[in-house]
Image (spheres, rainbow, N blue to C red):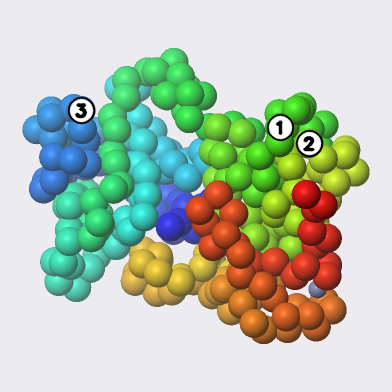
């Protein structure tokens, strides 16, 4: 599933293609994408709209359009965007043509991705505020803030890190990589010391920045706009490295399950909590 670095990679590739362009044609082939809004209505409102800016919040791509409209795209499990694909790719859900004849295909085999059209900045902000917590890589992302959010929480710290309404954009890959960097065991209860939260904050920042730097991780369907793969999977320290030596101490990396998610940990570097 694309996480913050993958969505940011797409955003950086998409912005120069879209910004300033007008939508000359659009076909929404899957009614699930716009639900509960009927796809015909979304098509009608997008046709002729100009894309002013492409931004990101958590795992959402935000198209700011003329007439104060906002298209909020979420790729979920298997969504990808392809620019000027050679043929019509299988599982295409949306086809879009720009006024400079650039073409964009939204492809999604499992169909969990969404495209919600909102009107006005207030509606956009309310939509995002209900779904997203603090944005990492911004000044508001501090150890104090995290400690406040987690006060009294006994659920594992990894579950906290994965909760989009607390921290926006971190998923399973970057949570494992961040907690390993922080030397914090994923099963520790969420109420950590301020010092530990500072390590977690730094771990998240480092993992996300490295992920962006490597243009995302392609362990499943994630592809760039031109179909190329990201390379962060080649730099994983623990994620998907069960049985391999820890890059820091050489101990075998273990795979455990936390909150139903496969989780990778070095139990020498990340001290297991006492139960
Ligand atoms: Zn280790």
Tell me which label, 3 or 1, sits earlier in the chain. 3
In depth, the one of 197 and 70 nearer the eye is: 197
Tell me which label, 2 or 1, sits earlier in the chain. 1
Where, quadrant-wise, is the N terminus in this rendering?
bottom left
Q: Residue at x 80, y 53 (%)?
A: 273
Percent across and percent down for residue 205 are 72, 52
Label 1, residues with CA under 10 Å away: few <14, some 14-19, many ≥20: some
Per the image, the residue denoted by label 2 is 191
Q: Which-is-in-front pick, marks 3 and 1? A: 1
Badge 3 marks a residue whose secondary structure is loop
Residue lying at the far right in this picture: please name it.
195
**Position of residue 216 in the picture relative to residue 235 (left or right):** left
Per the image, the residue denoted by label 1 is 153
Q: Which-is-in-front pick, marks 2 and 3? A: 2
Up the image or down, 111 lies above or below 251; here it is above
Label 2, residues with CA under 10 Å away: few <14, some 14-19, many ≥20: many
Percent across and percent down for residue 56 are 49, 42
Percent across and percent down for residue 82 are 29, 62
Q: Are marks 2 and 1 in contact (CB under 8 Å)?
A: yes
Tell me which label, 2 or 3, sits earlier in the chain. 3
Residue 211 visible in the current orientation? no
Q: CA distance from mark 2 to mark 1?
A: 6 Å
Q: Residue at x 21, y 35 (%)?
A: 34
Percent across and percent down for residue 193 are 87, 39
Label 3, residues with CA under 10 Å away: few <14, some 14-19, many ≥20: few
What is the quadrant of residue 240 in the picture? bottom right
In depth, the one of 201 and 6 nearer the eye is: 201
Q: Which mark is residue 36?
A: 3
Q: Are marks 3 and 1 in contact (CB under 8 Å)?
A: no
């Amino acid at each position: 599933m694309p996480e913050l670095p993958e969505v940011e990679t797409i955003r950086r590739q998409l912005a120069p293609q879209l910004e300033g362009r007008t939508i000359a044609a659009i076909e929404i082939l899957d009614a699930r994408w716009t639900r509960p809004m009927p796809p015909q209505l979304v098509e009608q409102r997008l046709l002729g709209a100009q894309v002013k800016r492409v931004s990101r919040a958590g795992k959402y791509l935000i198209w700011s359009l003329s007439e104060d409209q906002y298209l909020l795209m979420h790729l979920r499990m298997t969504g990808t965007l392809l620019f000027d694909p050679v043929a019509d790719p299988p599982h295409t859900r949306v086809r879009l043509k720009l006024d400079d004849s650039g073409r964009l295909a939204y492809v999604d085999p499992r169909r969990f991705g969404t495209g919600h059209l909102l009107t006005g900045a207030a509606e956009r902000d309310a939509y995002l505020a209900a779904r997203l917590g603090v944005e990492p890589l911004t000044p508001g992302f501090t150890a104090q803030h995290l400690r406040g959010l987690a006060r009294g929480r006994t659920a594992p710290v990894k579950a906290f890190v994965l909760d989009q309404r607390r921290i926006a954009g971190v998923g399973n890959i970057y949570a494992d990589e961040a907690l390993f960097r922080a030397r914090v065991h994923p099963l520790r209860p969420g109420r950590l010391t301020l010092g530990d939260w500072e390590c977690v904050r730094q771990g998240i920042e480092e993992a996300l920045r490295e992920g962006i730097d490597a243009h995302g991780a392609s362990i499943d369907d994630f592809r760039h706009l031109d179909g190329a793969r990201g390379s962060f999977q080649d730099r994983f320290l623990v994620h998907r490295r069960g049985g391999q030596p820890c890059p820091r101490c050489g101990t075998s990396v273990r795979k455990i399950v936390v909150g139903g998610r496969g989780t990778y940990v070095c139990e020498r570097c990340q001290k297991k909590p006492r139960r």
